[in-house]
Structures are given as C-alpha cells and as structure tokens.
Amino acid sequence: MNKTFKFIAFLLLGAVTFPVTAQSTDLARIEYTYFPQSDSDNSFRRFRTFVNLPIKLNKNGAYLIPGVEYRNVNFKYENNEAFSTNNLDRFQSFTGKVGYTFKMNELWRFGAETGVKVASNFATNELVKDDFIYTGSVYFIKIKEDERYIEPWRLILGLSYSTTTGFPFPLPVINYYKRFDEKWSYGLGIPKTNLKYYFNDKHQVQGFVTLDGFFANIQQNFNPYPQTNPGADRLAESMSMTIVLSGLGYQYNFTDYISFYAYAGYTVMNDIRLRDKDREDLYTIDENNTFYARGGLKFSIL
C-alpha cells in the first residue's frame, strides 16, 4: 500500500461516543470487552464490530470513507434498587458515517467526517427521536518524513462535535505519534496515550492510558427515587458509562495487516450513571474502579 493510502484512516474511524478516535488506523475490527464491577454483582460486557471502506476519488489524494459500526452492550444490573432494572440490561447501537480527505500540500492533509448513531435499550421495539446521536469533525493532519526515524511522525489537530457530550460547541482534538527507534514508539493524545515496544514484526507490547465507555437512550423514562421522591420531575432518560483505563496490551501480527490483540488492566475512573433530559447526573449506579479485559481481531493499514 502506498503512503497516501496508509494515512487516510487518520480521519475519524468511529467517534460517536467519544469524538476523538483519530489515532486509529483500523479499517475493520471484531472486539469483546469485559468489566466486572467491584463491590457489586454488576458486570459490563460489550461486543463491537466495524468496517471502514476507503474509496479513491481522483489522483490528487482525495478519498471518500464510508463506515458502519455495531455495538451490543450487556449490562448485568444485579443491584437491589427501588426501581425496576429489567430494561437496563441490554443496549445496542448502530452507526453510519462518512469521511472525506484530500491532500492540501506535501505536508498537510485535510479530513472531515459526519455520522449518525442510533443508541438505545429499544424497550418499545421502535425508534424515537432521542435514540439518535449526531457527530461532525474536521482534522488537519501533518505527516513529515525524517530519515532518523523508522516511520514518518504524524500530528493531528482538529475539532469534533457530538450530541452526547452535552457541550453545544466542538471540542479540540490533538494527537502526536512517533516511532523513534526500531524497537520503540509512542503516541500522545485522546482517547489513547501509549508507549509501545516491538519485539519483532510479529510481537508487540504496550503500556497505555485510554478513554472508553458508552452512551444510550432509555426509551421508557422512569423516576429512580420512587419512594423518597415520588413526584420528581427529573426522570432517568439516558445511561452513560465513562471509563479511564490503564493497562498493558499485547498484539500478534498474523500478516502485515491482520492482528490479534489482548488488553488487560485496571480502571482509573469508572463512572456509570443515569442522566436526565439535560444529560445531567441523576443517579450513580457504580463508581468503584475495577479490573477489565479486552481482546479481538483487527485489519489495519499500519
């Protein structure tokens, strides 16, 4: 694959819940995540898969990148609550998005993406307005050759907006990557900062800190305080999980583009909450830090 094609995936490859995944160079992935919750019988399991398909438009380095993603979240809600948890154990999301990129000059590339996501517990088996989440992003990507390094270094600057954040304005995006030695590379940014060691072309390990989570609509809104505040006008209308993870990861490359990976570690922040119509905190389900594990297969262009 030529160098231009290798870097087109630095647009956004799946930023709906967290609008800053511009560090990813994955074109397809199948993944399973497990979070047992400390000091409770709750647990969080997620299946995720996505595909992005770059389409070359002309000789000037312009690409159109449509993509789709599916997530299935199984939250085993075993806490003894005053409200029914029957409709809070399964959330699904379906995402469609399209990105566009072109080469501005020898150093800079521009990218933009827009997408729509349907995320809900689907308690009524019908779509409602609040199930829909909208995103938009713009990026400026600098790729600079340097004969001292194994690969070119990359800088990504941008703005990204998502209706899940609760902020009515775009948020900044920044990411910097460099492989400074045959055995070492690092990436600085959000949602992931890491330091990677390459044993050889097949085996890699890394230490990292990253952001993860989910956000979904609750179709049948309810009062989480039916006994102490039966006339409450603030109802639980959505559920969110915001997690900051630290840990170690291992990757095995079957080929130059197909890899198996496994991550494990401990959460730095584990925040699971019910939120009201204004996305304000309403009820804390769990906030204790816990062990987690994640693994899967991916098809990457780097």
Image (cartoon, grey):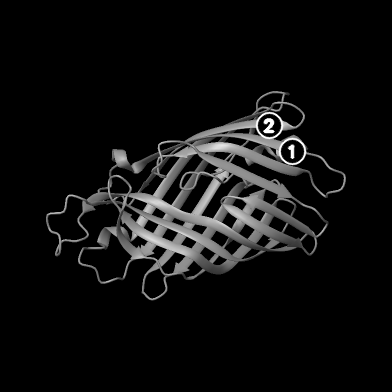
The residue carrying mark 1 is 143
The residue carrying mark 2 is 109
In the depicted structure, whether residue 206 falls above or below residue 140: below
- In the rendered image, the residue lying farthest to the bottom is 39
Local crowd size for mark 1, using a 10 Å CA cut-off: few (<14), some (14–19), many (≥20): some
Number of marks in picture: 2
Residue 263 drawn at (x, y percent): 59, 65
Whether residue 2 is visible to the viewer of this picture, yes or no, is no
Looking at the image, is mark 1 or mark 2 earlier in the sequence?
A: 2
In the depicted structure, whether residue 71 falls above or below residue 141: below
Q: Residue at x 54, y 39 (%)?
A: 67
Left or right of residue 275, residue 144 in this image:
right
Residue 9 drawn at (x, y percent): 64, 40
* Quadrant hosting residue 62: top right
Residue 11 drawn at (x, y percent): 61, 38
Left or right of residue 123, residue 151 in this image:
right
What amino acid type should be assigned to the residue bearing mark 2?
Arg
Local crowd size for mark 2, using a 10 Å CA cut-off: few (<14), some (14–19), many (≥20): many
What amino acid type should be assigned to the residue bearing mark 1?
Ile
Q: How far apart are marks 1 and 2 (CA)?
A: 8 Å
* Quadrant hosting residue 255: bottom right
In-front residue for pair 204/194: 194
Q: Quadrant of the N terminus?
A: top right
Residue 215 drawn at (x, y percent): 39, 51
SS of the residue under disc 1? strand
In the depicted structure, whether residue 280 falls above or below residue 3: below
Residue 191: numbered disc: none
SS of the residue under disc 2? strand
Whether residue 71 is visible to the viewer of this picture, yes or no, is yes
- In the rendered image, the residue lying farthest to the right is 147
In-front residue for pair 217/299: 217
